[in-house]
Amino acid sequence: SIASRDIATYLHSYTNLKKHETDGPLVVNGGRGIYIQDEAGKEYIEGMAGLWCASLGFSEERLVEAAIAALRRLPYYHTFGGKTTEIGVDLAEKLLSTAPVPMSKVFFANSGSEANDSVVKLVWYYNNALERPAKKKILARTKGYHGVTVASASLTGLPNNHRDFDLPIANIMHVDCPHHYRFGEPGESEEAFATRLADNLEKRILAEGPETVAAFIAEPIMGAGGVILPPAGYFEKVQAILKKYDILMIADEVICGFGRTGNMWGCQTFGIKPDILVCAKALSSAYLPISAVMISEPIYQAMVRQSEKIGVFAHGFTYSGHPVSSAVALETLKIYEERDIVGHVQAIAPKMQKWIRSFADRPLVGECRGTGLIGAIELVADKATHAPFDAKLGVGAYLAQRAQEGGLILRAMGDSIGFCPPLIITGDELDEMFRRFDKALGETE
Ligand code: PLP
């Protein structure tokens, strides 16, 4: 069987390896709209758009055609030594035209992790260019998620990504997670919580020495950390401090970008003015791997001066700006525009958010949260104190498993259950998704 061959050969990403030897895989062989199909032909609603990425669902023919046409025209070329392709330039122009603040240049990579890894290097290169060799520390946040390569996993603020991998690397450190429900003090308003976190950030910068702190990286909404929304006023307060100490703001829009929060960018939803913006996933609706880093003009100018001094800017991947991925991304952006995907999210988000909040009174449900077409329900042992379940119980994973049996793929991040369906989901499909969730929740209670 495929399952036994999988167990014999495959090292799975983000999987309990021992358990997999007995449980085996879910074999996914097809997709249609918001649904995927397993090898027996059973259909599941993909409530997470795969890994927060397949925004146009699983059967968008135009993306298939764009890939085929690009493969026929020029299946591969690179961007080293000043080479380029028209499709790559088209995509760079398109991305810059949508940026939430004026951006100067785009660097392409293949995944969110590679893009964030590149950002770490760009920040260091930039400060070397400015002859500030000490200004190298990058502040990330506990529970943030930025990927799994050595530098990106260091930025990630989740214990499992560090433990036994000998991470984080030097010069990457973590500050407070902005989860009001979990870390707010009794009676503390969101605004007061945001002020406290911003004060802590400033204290940390002063303790490290502002001349040593180069950048701060944040997802507008933390995704893999459990869909954590910033408390009211958070980014405004944080950015005022970053500005005071000449620290770059990096927005990791890998999940939030391209309409997910009800605007083109999460930065617009939360008033973030980034110096560097990272995107991936929905950039190509995940049909082919591609990610992008947009940088501001001052950063670019410093880099140019440095490159002039030392010769080449020695960074880039074999597949940076791959013409086939670029063509699929460009077509994806065209579809978003033609179908007004942001307008669709705005129209349908109230229904999704109402559904999420409709579970608030259920016995296991602590917090219901979200905006746009992203959200989570956090399960707790004690609704009054917010006390979590013992992690060993695996309550979230149990619920996700019940949902899967009932034809709905969701993701348990600890005991937070994420919802991030394809952006093309209709109102009726949302209703069906939450009916299936309701059943799974009932079975878990
Ligand atoms: N940044 C964020 C916010 C993400 O959610 C992810 C992946 O989930 C990444 C970066 C890493 O992207 P990739 O898995 O493509 O390396």
Image (cartoon, rainbow, N blue to C red):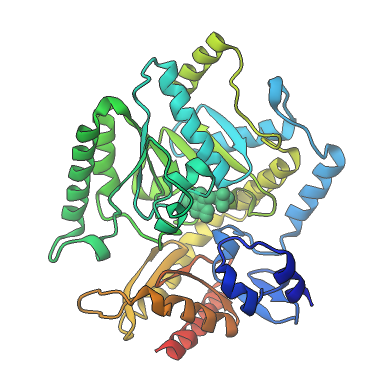
- Residue 355 image point, x, y percent: 42, 76
- Residue 400 image point, x, y percent: 50, 77
> Residue at the spot x=61%, y=36% of the render?
108
- Residue 260 image point, x, y percent: 49, 56
Residue lying at the far left in this picture: please name it: 187
State the residue in front, 14 or 192.
Answer: 14
> Going by the image, does 388 lie left or right of 159?
left
Residue 98 showing in the rendered view: no
Number of numbered discs visible in the structure rendering = 0
Q: Quadrant of the C terminus?
A: bottom left
> Residue at the spot x=45%, y=63% of the render?
374
Q: Quadrant of the N terminus?
A: bottom right
Tell me which corner region of the image, top left, top right, bottom left or bottom right, holds residue 2: bottom right
Residue lying at the far top in this picture: please name it: 309
Residue 330 showing in the rendered view: yes
State the residue in front, 306 or 83.
Answer: 306
State the residue in front, 113 or 337.
Answer: 113
> Residue at the spot x=67%, y=72% of the render?
36
> Residue at the spot x=30%, y=45% of the render?
235
> Going by the image, does 371 lie left or right of 36?
left
> Going by the image, does 182 lie left or right of 214?
left
- Residue 228 image point, x, y percent: 36, 60
